[in-house]
Image (cartoon, rainbow, N blue to C red):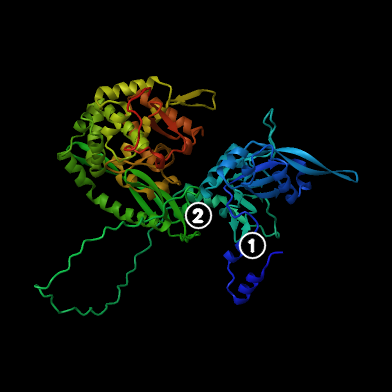
Amino acid sequence: MVDLGPLLAKHAAGTLAFHDTMPIQKHDKREVIGWLHMDTGIHTKAINEDAAMASLLHDNQSLVKGDTLVDVIKCEKDPQNRMLRWGIASDTALRQLQGTTLKLRITTTSGKVKSTTLMSFQLTLPHALDGFYMDIPGGLQGLFEERLLFETLQRLEPRFLWGMYTSVSATTGLAGSRYRIHFLGSELPSTMLLDGRMVEEFIFRGRCLRVYGRGWFFRDKRLARLDLDAIAASTDHAKPSTHPPHPTTAPQATPAKRQKTATKDPNAWTDVRRKTPSVAPAPYPVHLHGRPWASPNAFAALHERWTVGHAVHRADHDGVSFETIIPEATASDSDPVHHTAGEYVTCPKPHKGKISHVEVPLDDLIAELQSLEAKSTVAIHHHASHVEAAVRGSEVNLAVLVNTGRVDSTCTFMERHPEDFGIQLHHLFASDRPTFELFLRQRLLHRWLRVTWGGSASFDQLYTKSFGTKMSRDSVAELFRALQRSDTLEPITCETDDGDELTLSRFDLELVLALAEVLVAAHSPLYYASDAAIMVSTGSSIEAIPTHRGLRSLQAPTMLNVLMTTRMGEELWRLMETMFSGDDDMHRVMVYLADIHASGYIDISCIGTTRWNQDSGRFVVDIGQNNESATQFDVSTATPGVGLQY
């Protein structure tokens, strides 16, 4: 027996701590870094954990190295799923044991005789569907309800994965009624807890759907209900509201502070010390891998407090008309259900040429919306004067910037003088279409190369490093001709309800998104610059692209979300339809994009981002790409312009 005298003495003295117990603990002190599952089937109930651990270590030494078996430090029996779970303490052992077949001694009973048999079982990695799930025995009514439930739960719970019917015929697709909702991880999501009880009933489309969670039981007949209809309504519809009145009572006057009357001697010596440079701490914590992109109730709390609409303001001067779409951030006057304390949303922040993902508290996003309200008032007041100044004369010529390839300067011009930039952009479209098309191509390349390399170097350097030549009108034209001929960017294809096949090239999709971003930057600069406004209108977090100069750009999934799902997107769509009213090719692209989106084929979050692959010398689409993995320009050793295939 272990001598517990020292522990008992410390316990009696009131000084016993956890670390005092560690020397007498016999289990391995290392952390489990991964799990492997062993499907034991009908034998699970008869397996004893002690016997299984002993058998694993002693009966498999001829199959697996001893130093690998030593890294198996945990055994858990899961009778419900008829498996054993083995905890592994090293990456090497996890890789070596994956897929390995090991032997266990299983006790079997035949009549009154018990015998021990060696059986082989394979170790496999956990499947994504092995986590927590909730069952709806009554099922759902059609594909519309399945999609609505998916979109509602996706906004509510970051760990929600998907839903599926549990009983489906492999030959005909015939499905039963039980519908299962899967979540990532084995723990119950916090959004499915109400006062410590698991949600036992959904209010969905006016019906009460009974739900059963994995491994949970019901205490009584008082069911914990979650109103999904209210959640869907709070995110889909903007409610008109008024801003709460400001207090009218003036603060009490306080006596003036007594002032110091002594004067400093002008001849006195002054101590001069070298200032120690200090690095200011980051204002927000950096988002860590594995944490949710948003806290459970962040978007629900945001939507019940603020809505973002817009108003179109037109100014005319000397025959030139220009529209500015000014956002209208409106505070709700209803009592909020969710608190803001502890809630956060991960936002992209440019830092030293890269995008750093930080967790911004919800209160700071609300403060940004409050400041947006004041900025909108100022923008309305100065809109006409800005348009008049742009029409009278500009210090910057957009056509010259485009033709000389000054892409970074164009970004600066677009950010600092959006009305002037927008007026010149529409003038180029109407009177100099080749220069306008060159601008769009430069914009596409800017987005793609910034995703690849970041924003630390100038665009000219990125272009030369990627393609092995300096940028010119001819080199850009040749680059896009090769890109349109190649098949490296897979097109988007879907089938309509009528059986017709629609095909939209990735190049055309990127072209529309680049144009939409330029239009929103010119016609609604306040909305484009506000992360909070974009998140409120789209109902999701955003992804950004770093720039060398000017404001950050928006990645393809975020820009597509703005264009296809928001009221601001409707205004951008109207502007593009007006511009390309006589262009059959562009009209076809826009119709195809609208039809494909309406069919539900495009999953906006999974369209990925286009970037340049230096090793293969071609453009590729990365799914789930973010700028934390952008290649550092100054440390890349790839040879410029090798094997260009576009």
Residue that protrudes farthest toward the top in the picture: 485
Q: Residue furthest left?
A: 267
Q: Position of residue 271 (x, y in %)?
A: 17, 68
The residue at the point 18 percent across, 43 percent down is: 388
On the image, the x and y values in percent for residue 462 come to: 30, 33
Label 2 packing within 10 angstroms: few (<14), some (14-19), many (20+): many
Q: Compared with residue 495, is residue 140 higher up or lower down, i.e. above or below?
A: below
Q: Residue at x 70, y 40 (%)?
A: 60
**Residue 44: quadrant of the picture:** top right
Which of the marked residues, 1 or 2, is nearer the chain's N terminus?
1
Q: Mark 2: which amino acid?
A: Asn
In the rendered image, the quadrant that contains the C terminus is top left
Query: What element does badge 2 sit on?
Result: loop
Say which residue appears at 67% left-offset and 49% top-offset. 75
Amino acid of disc 1: Ile
Residue 482 visible somewhere in the drawing: yes
Q: Which residue is under mark 1?
A: 24
Task: Judge from the rendering whether residue 419 lies leftward or rightward of residue 142; answer left or right.
Answer: left
| Quarter occupied by the N terminus | bottom right
- Graded by Cα atoms within 10 Å as few (under 14), some (14 to 19) or many (20 or more), the crowding at tag 1 reads few
Q: Nearer the viewer, residue 172 or 53?
A: 53
For residue 281, which numbered disc appears in the image? Answer: none
Question: Considering depth in this image, is 169 or 566 the residue closer to the camera?
Answer: 169
- Distance CA(mark 1)–CA(mark 2): 44 Å
Number of numbered callouts drawn:
2
Q: Which residue is mark 2?
A: 297
- 284 sits to left or right of 440: right
Q: Which of labels 1 and 2 is toward the front? A: 1
> Residue 19 falls in which quadrant of the image?
bottom right
Q: Is residue 574 visible?
A: no
